[in-house]
Image: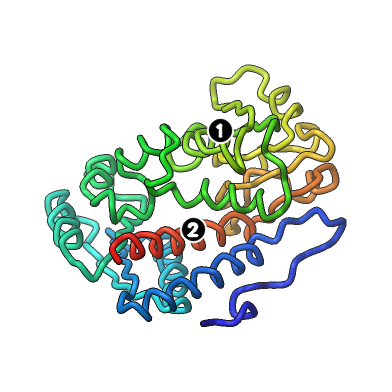
Amino acid sequence: MPSPTTFIIAQDNSRNVVVDGRGIAGQILCEQAGRVAELKKNGVTPGLAFVRVGEDPASKVYVGRKEKACAELGIFSEMHVLAEQATEGELLALIAKLNANPRLHGILVQAPLPKHISEAKIYSAVSPYKDVDGFHPLNVGKLMLGDSTGFCPCTPAGIVQLLARSNVTTEGAEVVILGRGNIVGKPMAAMLCQKGKNANATVTICHSATRDIQSHCRRADILIAAMGVANFVRADMVKPGATVIDVGVNRVGGKIVGDVDFAAVRQIAGKITPNPGGVGPMTIAMLMSNTVAAASQKN
């Protein structure tokens, strides 16, 4: 089993504001390494298949990080790459083959897919029991019903863990989510408004048609920015002492920046995630957690 130092990176304690996503993700990965070791004692090696269509540079980087995490935890992984011109039928045939492979407990189809391929159709084709991304309609339905037997999308699940392990109370909190996407915004709202541990929040979703979005943001105890607009959240939009979670990934001038003006907002916030180094590592950690859970169900 890897030692904690394999994963955990020292926390930035300046003003005790910056939330160390890498360190918290490291804690989760160490926990999963222990679970992998126990599964292997029982003759089960968790297996995860990655599927990528085309040569999108960002997708290659993201999948590479996930492959590295698998290797560090002792999870078996295999990569399948189809050409950009591959048909929807070819991708569906590959998914059917992976669904039938007993060595694989999880399947991840890396987004984005080419425009001629329906993401909804592809995500529905992945077995719900191997859907470690949490995008299959069955798992989405379970999430809405508060059924914990399904897989939750990795980024929102990572944010829930990030808040819990940073001692941020969600019960009774005013949470404002910027963005209504299927990957972050909608599932994030569903998780935080559930009746249960690390939830019980009052949730508002804001989007491009929201009136006076600044006033919504200023009343948030927890502000989650997932709009995909660089530096959208300014200091004057944040309530002093609020927790600010930056999910955005935006390329500006060859650099990756978030949805939050980090330098300014950190002077106001009680806690804030850096970008990079905040939500991203948590997403990978929860993918590993879902894969181990899938392998445990098969055991």
Residue where numbered disc 1 is placed = 195
Residue where numbered disc 2 is placed = 286
Residue drawn at x 66%, y 32% as measured from the top left:
175
Say whether marks 1 and 2 touch (CB < 8 Å).
Answer: no
Residue drawn at x 69%, y 24% as measured from the top left:
216
- Residue type beneath disc 2: Met
- Residue type beneath disc 1: Lys
Q: Picture coordinates of residue 289 (x, y %)?
A: 46, 61
Q: Picture coordinates of residue 215 (x, y %)?
A: 73, 22
Q: Picture coordinates of residue 172 (x, y %)?
A: 70, 30
Q: Which mark is drawn over residue 250? A: none
Mark 1 and mark 2 lie on one chain; the one further toward the N terminus is 1
User: Nearer the viewer's eye, disc 1 or disc 2?
Assistant: 1
Query: Looking at the image, is 29 positioned above or below residue 2?
Result: above
Q: Is residue 134 left or right of residue 176?
A: left
Q: Residues within 10 Å of mark 1 (few under 14, many from 20)?
A: few
The foreground one among 172 and 9 is 172
In the picture, residue 90 is in which quadrant?
Answer: bottom left
Q: Residues within 10 Å of mark 2 (few under 14, many from 20)?
A: many
Query: Looking at the image, is 234 positioned above or below residue 163?
Result: above
Q: Is residue 197 left or right of residue 112?
A: right
Quick one: SS at disc 2?
helix
Q: Picture coordinates of residue 45 (x, y %)?
A: 33, 75
Give the CA distance from mark 1 to mark 2.
Answer: 21 Å
The foreground one among 69 and 193 is 193
Quick one: SS at disc 1?
loop
